């Protein structure tokens, strides 16, 4: 029953101890003294009301009770008076062969007028009376029984107060009334002893009276004002108390100083209250007529002892003490410190949780798994490293100074170690570790299971063949608190499904469940870290909860079954979207192809209206998201996709017609675009100006053809006016641009013709300036060419090669410029200039260019050949380079006969190349791949020089060794090596 169905009686603050179920013999003894007449009086309906028997004794003993008590009576109920447990009372309603439980007859003290009293104890009480009720249920949380009023109906009238002809005389009918939750003290079962019930009420009333009197007494004492004559605790007494309290051994002064001030205040307050209590008691006892409402608490009489000490029987104290000290591990302060620190560390573990169950935001499954995995990693790291290290460090730190004896950490013998107290201490710490791990796992698993069950509680009873109702906007399956997971409803070519497979939730959750337990596995026992001189196995772990313990299996199955059950309404909900699959997977282009391209405007209008109506219906019938059990299903993407698909279909039909006309307009206007664009091109030279003038003579014929095509397209636009369809700015602009193109082009031609006259004069002036600049450039190049004759230094060959290349490039540019100038002179109608001297400069420069470029290349390559290893030299390129260089230098020597300096430089470099050419056989022989170690040894013996076939061997090193002086011997060895290699290659 919900809170609004509760009666006006307050739920007890605490539930007293429930007595054990009495044995049958105790029940029979309870009712044996009752004589048959008395038993009939209590249990039969025809006799006097049992309530009278219970109420009269109470009234006789409660003459001094207040009219408005401060506390509800059920707070003072004593359940020891109850002979049966609530389950036993409810079991009386079970009948053999009947699945339903019948109400148990009883009488309850309920409001007479079916009113609900206030929860305030000081509010005026409602008029209550004893009613016949039937007991239906019992709530362990409320400690109350659910009862239903029973009204007696004679049956002479029906429900409309009309005479009932079928009424049988002498039979009373019972009519069910309102339901109430009532405490046990307001409920009298017909099967219990009314006298015991009366004693129960009397006990509660007396208990409440004594409690209220005691509270009133203590409140009076606490609020009694202090006056100057009241004795107070002197400073000397307080200092004596502090001195004796602090004299106790083992006190930590640093921690004590923090609470010293509070303790002093508490002592003074206790002393002052004792003084006020003594004064107050004396005043009440001396003048009772002034304090009629004060009841002094009864004090137990003090017994005067006969002796000053407690008599103790004789026993051997020393022997008993020694035996106790021998067995206990708490005989050392250091051990107590270890246990205290151990308990603190274990409490930290118990306070942890293996799963994040406090999040109020739903997550996607992968995100949820990542969060839990991160928690698992952190806890595993703490348990396996920090926790074990802290406990080991605590033991070592506290016991290190004890030395040999019961707590010898340097012990090396197993038999002695197992008899020591240190071994027992290790067991105690290990058992505490195991207990902490078990509490951690059990609490975490219960919280995780409760989290899932709370989220799935509304879907646990769903049948397998569940069919979703037509309403897709609301869900009847809500979680108790918050949903856990976020899902996307997906429609695609494969059908309707969810972004995460539903089967993955149960599998993943069970996997997380097991991984959470496994986090507490493989925690090493700390014995091996403490006992350094003992050998321990590597697989000694702290025991934890097993995966297949009955409680764990039960929780795991609850989670699995709940998540499997939670998938049922999700599947039913997804099945409702299968009717939208055809629309979702529909290809717009395919649909348009199936429609007649040449359809009429009326057919187009009907199709568009149908699509827009379907779009509005989808928007109203589908939600953006919906909560189903533990899942938040996001439907917004599907909703948007379907509505956009309908809208796109409507727009596609209209757009296709627009595109058709726009395409025709574009095709017609393309020629005008090209004409206008070409007219807008500004000529950059006299050549382009002449070409454009010739093209402009063809434009009138092109415009005539365009106008004939446009007259066929424009009438089609009248269809959009009938549909009230607004053309886009682009299409509207295209239409009117197409109409205005001919006149625009004619106007543009007139402006361009006028501009061409000005451009021609501008090109004429620019040509004169260009001609003068080119003449000056040729004069400058001729002067620079003279400088090449004076240079003959081979050491500056690289510099000269760069200058020659740059000069040659300038001459090529001059040749191109000369041709351009001659062409423009013909177009402008001016005399053509002769530029033969440009070709002469090119021919004169050729010998110098060959000389210095060849020289520069040779110097660079020869240096590389001398410094690089012989293995990196490409002989074919080397020989080709030498041959080309010699051929070019011979030609230069002939061409430079009139220039002695340059001819001498060509001759010198030619000689150097010839000298280097003589080293080619040496390089070829030394790089012969057939050369083996014994060939190199033979070569060293022939030339009397020790030659090592290293990869870093260079030509310059060979020349330093003088190998060029033994060419014949080296060639002979290479020939021998080649022959041997050829012989080896011949197959046997």
Image (cartoon, rainbow, N blue to C red):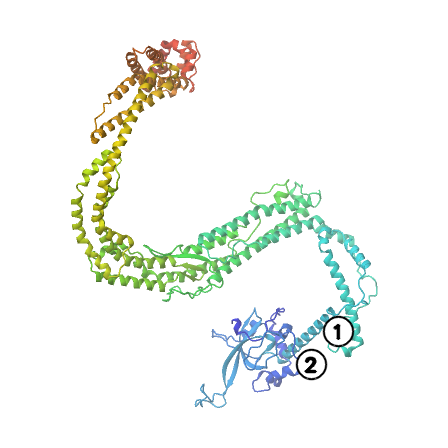
Front-lying residue, 374 or 713: 713
Q: Which residue is mark 1?
A: 296
Describe the element under mark 2 as helix, strand or loop: loop
Mark 2 vs mark 1, CA separation in Å: 19 Å
Q: Which residue is mark 2?
A: 61
Residue 812: percent from left, percent from top: 28, 24
Disc 1 residue crowd, few under 14, some 14–19, many 20+, Cα 10 Å: some
Residue 524: percent from left, percent from top: 57, 46
Disc 2 residue crowd, few under 14, some 14–19, many 20+, Cα 10 Å: few
- Quarter of the C terminus within the rendering: top left
N-terminal of the two: label 2 or label 1?
Answer: 2
Q: Looking at the rendering, which quadrant does residue 83 occupy? A: bottom right
Q: Is residue 625 visible?
A: yes
Front-lying residue, 952 or 334: 952
Work out whether 159 lies above or below 679.
below
Q: Which residue shows up at 69% across the image and 45% down it? A: 399
Quick check: 558 left or right of 757?
right
Quick check: 686 left or right of 74?
left
Residue 295: percent from left, percent from top: 74, 75
How many dots with numbers?
2
Q: Looking at the rendering, which quadrant does residue 927 occupy? A: top left
Work out whether 543 lies above or below 94.
above
Quick check: 624 left or right of 763?
right
Q: Is residue 928 visible?
A: no
Front-lying residue, 299 or 199: 299
Q: Looking at the rendering, which quadrant does residue 271 occupy? A: bottom right
Q: Which residue shows up at 60% across the image and 86% down it? A: 48
């Amino acid at each position: 029953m919900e809170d609004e169905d509760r009666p006006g009686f307050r739920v007890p603050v605490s539930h007293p101890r429930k007595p054990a179920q009495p044995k049958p013999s105790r029940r029979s003894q309870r009712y044996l003294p009752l004589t048959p007449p008395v038993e009939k009086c209590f249990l039969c309906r025809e006799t006097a009301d049992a309530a009278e028997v219970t109420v009269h004794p109470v009234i006789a003993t409660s003459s001094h009770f207040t009219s408005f008590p401060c506390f509800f009576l059920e707070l003072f109920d004593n359940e020891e008076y109850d002979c049966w447990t609530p389950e036993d009372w409810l079991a009386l309603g079970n009948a053999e062969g009947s699945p339903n439980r019948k109400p148990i007859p009883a009488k309850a003290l309920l409001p007479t007028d079916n009113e609900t009293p206030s929860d305030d104890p000081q509010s005026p009480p409602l008029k209550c009376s004893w009613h016949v009720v039937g007991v239906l249920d019992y709530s362990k949380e409320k400690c109350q029984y659910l009862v239903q009023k029973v009204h007696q109906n004679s049956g002479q009238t029906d429900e409309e107060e009309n005479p009932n002809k079928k009424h049988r005389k002498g039979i009373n009918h019972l009519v069910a009334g309102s339901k109430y939750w009532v405490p046990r003290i307001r409920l009298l079962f017909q099967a219990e002893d009314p006298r015991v019930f009366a004693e129960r009420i009397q006990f509660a009333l007396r208990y409440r009276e004594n409690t209220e009197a005691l509270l009133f007494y203590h409140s009076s004492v606490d609020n009694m004002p202090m006056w100057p004559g009241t004795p107070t605790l002197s400073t000397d007494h307080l200092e004596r108390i502090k001195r004796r309290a602090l004299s106790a051994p083992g006190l930590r002064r640093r921690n004590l100083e923090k609470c010293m001030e509070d303790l002093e205040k508490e002592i003074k307050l206790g002393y002052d209250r004792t003084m006020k209590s003594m004064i107050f008691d004396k005043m009440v006892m001396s003048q009772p007529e002034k304090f009629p409402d004060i009841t002094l608490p009864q004090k137990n009489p003090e017994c005067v002892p006969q002796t000053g000490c407690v008599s103790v029987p004789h026993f051997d104290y020393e022997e008993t003490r020694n035996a106790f000290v021998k067995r206990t591990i708490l005989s050392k302060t250091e051990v107590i410190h270890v246990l205290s620190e151990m308990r603190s560390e274990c409490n930290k573990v118990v306070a942890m949780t293996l799963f994040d169950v406090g999040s109020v935001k739903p997550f996607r499954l992968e995100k949820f798994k990542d969060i839990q995995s991160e928690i698992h990693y952190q806890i595993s790291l703490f348990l396996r490293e920090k926790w074990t290290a802290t406990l080991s460090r605590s033991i070592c730190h506290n016991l290190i100074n004890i030395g040999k004896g019961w707590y010898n950490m340097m012990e090396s013998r197993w038999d002695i170690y197992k008899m020591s107290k240190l071994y027992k201490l290790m067991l105690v710490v290990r058992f505490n570790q195991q207990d902490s791990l078990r509490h951690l796992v059990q609490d975490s698993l219960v919280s995780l299971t409760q989290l899932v069950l709370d989220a799935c509680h509304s879907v646990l009873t769903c049948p397998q063949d569940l069919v979703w109702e037509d309403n897709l906007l609301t869900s009847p399956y809500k979680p108790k608190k918050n949903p856990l997971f976020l899902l996307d409803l997906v429609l695609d070519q494969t059908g309707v499904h969810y972004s995460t497979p539903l089967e993955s939730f149960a599998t993943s959750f069970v996997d997380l469940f097991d991984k959470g337990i496994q986090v507490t596995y493989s925690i090493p026992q700390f014995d091996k870290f403490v006992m350094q001189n003992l050998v321990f196995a590597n697989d000694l772990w702290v025991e934890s909860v097993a995966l297949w313990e009955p409680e764990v299996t039960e929780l795991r199955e609850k989670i699995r079954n709940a998540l499997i059950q939670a998938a049922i309404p999700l599947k039913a909900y997804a099945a409702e979207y299968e009717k939208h699959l055809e629309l979702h997977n529909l290809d717009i282009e395919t649909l348009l192809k199936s429609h007649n391209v040449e359809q009429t405007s009326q057919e187009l209008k009907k199709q568009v209206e149908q699509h827009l109506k379907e779009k509005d219906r989808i928007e109203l019938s589908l939600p953006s998201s919906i909560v189903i059990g533990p899942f938040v299903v996001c439907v917004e993407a599907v909703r948007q996709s379907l509505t956009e698909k309908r809208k796109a279909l409507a727009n596609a039909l209209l757009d296709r017609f627009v595109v058709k006309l726009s395409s025709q307009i574009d095709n017609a206007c393309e020629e005008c675009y090209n004409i206008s664009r070409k007219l807008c091109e500004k000529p950059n030279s006299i050549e382009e100006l002449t070409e454009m003038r010739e093209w402009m003579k063809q434009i009138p014929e092109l415009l005539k053809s365009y106008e004939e095509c446009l007259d066929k397209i424009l009438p089609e636009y009248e269809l959009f006016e009938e549909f009230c369809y607004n053309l886009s700015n682009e299409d509207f602009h295209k239409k009117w641009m197409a109409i205005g193109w001919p006149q625009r082009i004619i106007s543009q031609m007139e402006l361009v013709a006028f501009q061409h006259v000005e451009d021609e004069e501008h090109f004429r002036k620019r040509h004169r300036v260009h001609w003068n600049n080119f003449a000056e450039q040729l004069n400058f190049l001729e002067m620079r060419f003279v400088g090449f004759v004076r240079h003959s230094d081979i050491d500056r060959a690289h510099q000269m090669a760069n200058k020659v290349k740059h000069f040659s490039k300038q001459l090529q540019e001059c040749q191109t410029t000369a041709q351009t100038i001659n062409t423009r002179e013909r177009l402008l109608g001016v005399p053509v200039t002769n530029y033969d001297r440009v070709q002469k400069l090119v021919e004169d420069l050729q010998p110098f260019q060959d000389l210095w470029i060849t020289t520069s290349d040779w110097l660079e390559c020869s240096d590389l050949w001398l410094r690089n290893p012989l293995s990196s030299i490409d002989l074919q390129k080397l020989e080709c380079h030498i041959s080309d260089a010699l051929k070019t230098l011979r030609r230069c020597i002939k061409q430079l006969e009139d220039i002695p300096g340059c001819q001498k430089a060509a001759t010198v470099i030619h000689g150097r190349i010839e000298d280097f050419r003589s080293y080619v056989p040496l390089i070829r022989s030394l790089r012969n791949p057939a050369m083996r170690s014994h060939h190199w040894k033979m070569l060293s013996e022939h030339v009397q020089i020790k030659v090592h076939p290293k990869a870093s061997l260079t030509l310059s090193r060979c020349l330093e060794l003088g190998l060029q002086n033994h060419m014949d011997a080296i060639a002979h060895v290479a020939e021998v090596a080649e022959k041997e290699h050829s012989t080896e290659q011949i197959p046997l």
